[in-house]
Image (cartoon, rainbow, N blue to C red):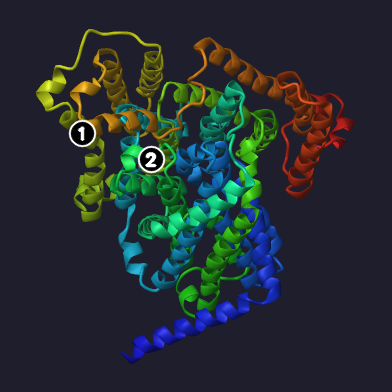
Amino acid sequence: MESIGGEIAFMAVSAGKAFLVLMEPHRLLFLGAGCIMGLVLGIIPGIGGLTGTAMLLPFTFNMDPYSAFALLLGLGATTATGDPIPAILFGVPGGAASAATVLDGFPMAKKGEAGRALSAAYMSSLMGGVFGACLMAVSIPVLRPVMLFIGSPELLAFSVLGISMVAVLSGNAPLRGIVAGCLGVMIAMIGTDPQTGTLRWTFDSLYLWDGLPLTPLLLGVFALPELCDLLIARVAISADTGVANIYKGQWQGVKDCFRHWWLIMRCSWIGGGIGSIPGISASVVDWLAYGHALKTEKGASATFGKGDVRGVIASESSNNAKEGGALVPTVAFGVPGSATMAILLGAFLIHGLVPGPDMLTKNLSITYAMVWSVALANILGAGLCYLFSPQFAKLATLRYSLILPAVLGIIYIGAFEATRQWGDLFTLLFFGLVGWIMKQFKWPRPPLILGVVLGDTIERYLFISIERYGLSFLLRPVVATLLALAFFGLVRPFLADVRSQGGLRRMLTSFQHPSFHPSQLFTMFMIGIIGAAVIASLGWDFSAKIVPLVVGTVGLIAAALSLFNEMCRKPAAAATEGLAEHAQHEVEEKIHMDLTSDTGHLPVREIVERAAWFFGYLMGFMAVMAVIGLIPTVGLFVIFFMRYEARERWALVVPYAVILVIFIWFTFDYFMAVPWPPTLAGQWLPFLKAIPSV
């Protein structure tokens, strides 16, 4: 008993010392600076906390450990707080971890509830972030045995569960979700096979040897389709965002969070728990929390995806809680819980700290300073957001001609930050087109992204598990439980379909002679591209082709069943269903892990023409950028787009172009020293390289 009491006293003294040290003015200043930068980087799509943390690391060389980690964790903890701002206002996730927030946050902004959605996001982020910090504080001394028990088989099972959860959330099209997820896993396998060195689907391109980077793919699949629809619809995102409504909405968002405090606690547990498992991406956490809320909250199936504040709360509370969770394995075992934490390990080395037992004994005060930094950063970040929330919400009333040029320029910069090659921009353009088609034909996009995120994890841990344990790893308790949950999640939509049709026999009679619809062309395209990938893999070594063959076969089967269902299934008649079942089908028709399009009221021909103009603008932007560089291109694009597309006044166009060019130059060229793509003008006339980005 005395030893336990001594341990508790030692921890309390260390926590108190850490708090007093962190309260010194200059350290609070570093924490505040990190918070502001984190919010800014969270708002900018595609940049994110990973780039920001790497950018700040060299500036911590001459700082003491308390100040250094205050700065770095201040940025890392609040990036997730800034992420929902573009997700809610523009439908563009600031990072992969805020993709689920778009589903309900964006529809709320369209209904004039941007302030309420933002407020709920801030408060749930604050509560989740503080919870994650508390989780780290109490779990570090006791989690070591648990973390040592989790091995490759458990990580594999978590990855499979993540993809199966997203497939379940694909509304009444779970087969499409499975197909998209399988394609994403196959995309993740592009490049050099780590086991045999086989080049898989590289098409003799050096750019693809290391695989497709996630950032341009993410921005292409999620961000560009929203900007395209913005141009097609040619309206502001929201027409009703008055200042009075925003302030009223703020208080309502706070009340929503306290009303649903138990949901925040549960989702924070999910975020903190999953975040503490190394190798599980942040992209998975918000989808798991969102799926949990969809399954457990009363009436969620009828309102989620249409602007339900509970969807925002679930996603954002888990998002911020994961940061505290990810610190646990980083500090205790030197195993980074996320990519950002991998960079944070560099800060440990810079300051002579060794992760492991020392961080739990002689350096425990520094460990608790990290806990306080995460907690205070979330409080400070949420406070800053509340101060400026009305200004953020007012952005939703801007015309598309004011939003699109600035966001597009930032997206190009964010995409190029992936590998800093021209291939990043071609990837952005290609997957932007694919993402827009998927959205128009109601194909779920998040399973594709999660497949890419988890593909390497699945293949790596599958090989390790089989090499070390054989097939007996399937009998491990945690693995068996997680795989059972994944299997139940996959078959649940089928069982619900059978039940809604009145039994298997009646469901089998609901088929008819094949009929054609244009949306089936995309399903055929998916069958063709997965089939071609499978055929190309047949000539590889066994170790290199086994996982692609298994995943590709599953994808082909699911795609074929989906095509058969689309062509031969009779439309569900509302008269044969109960009111509740019909309402749920209607909701699932629209939720499909995606946004309902704002362009449905327009003729198909007009939609296609305006979409062609949008992608024409993108290709023109890239062509001019190849000649004179990104920064001059941004200025010319703003002038051309705003004058030709929207007939804006010169008095607005010129200041807008000048301010945007100066902002991009100062932020990315002068401050961040981003290397720019090589240009033809710079090669032909070297003296022009004095011009930024040329």
Residue 30, horizontal then vertical, whole percent: 68, 66
- What amino acid does circle 2 point to? Phe
In percent of the image, x 73 and y 36: which residue is there?
Answer: 676
Which is more toward the observer, 125 or 480? 125
Q: In this view, does 432 lie to the left or right of 646?
A: left
- What amino acid does circle 1 point to? Ala
In percent of the image, x 39 and y 70: which residue is there?
Answer: 139
**Which quarter of the rendered picture does the C terminus lie within?**
top right
Residue annotated with mark 1: 496
Mark before the other along the chain sequence, 2 or 1:
2
**Which quarter of the rendered picture does the N terminus lie within?**
bottom left
Task: Tell me if I can see residue 463 in this picture.
Answer: no
Q: Which mark is residue 183?
A: none
Q: How far apart are marks 2 and 1 (CA)?
A: 18 Å
Residue 260, horizontal then vertical, whole percent: 38, 56
In percent of the image, x 55 and y 44: which residue is there?
Answer: 114
- Crowding at label 2, few (<14), some or many (≥20) Cα neighbours within 10 Å? many
Q: Nearer the viewer, mark 2 or mark 1?
A: 2
Decide: is 63 above or below 337: below
Residue 326, horizontal then vertical, whole percent: 46, 59
Residue 509, horizontal then vertical, whole percent: 14, 16
Secondary structure type for disc 1:
helix
Secondary structure type for disc 2:
loop
- Crowding at label 1, few (<14), some or many (≥20) Cα neighbours within 10 Å? some
Which is more toward the observer, 64 or 387? 387
Which is more toward the observer, 278 or 386? 386
Decide: is 421 above or below 626: below
- Residue farthest bottom in this picture: 2
Residue annotated with mark 2: 304
Q: Quadrant of residue 659?
A: top right
Which is more toward the observer, 222 or 503? 503
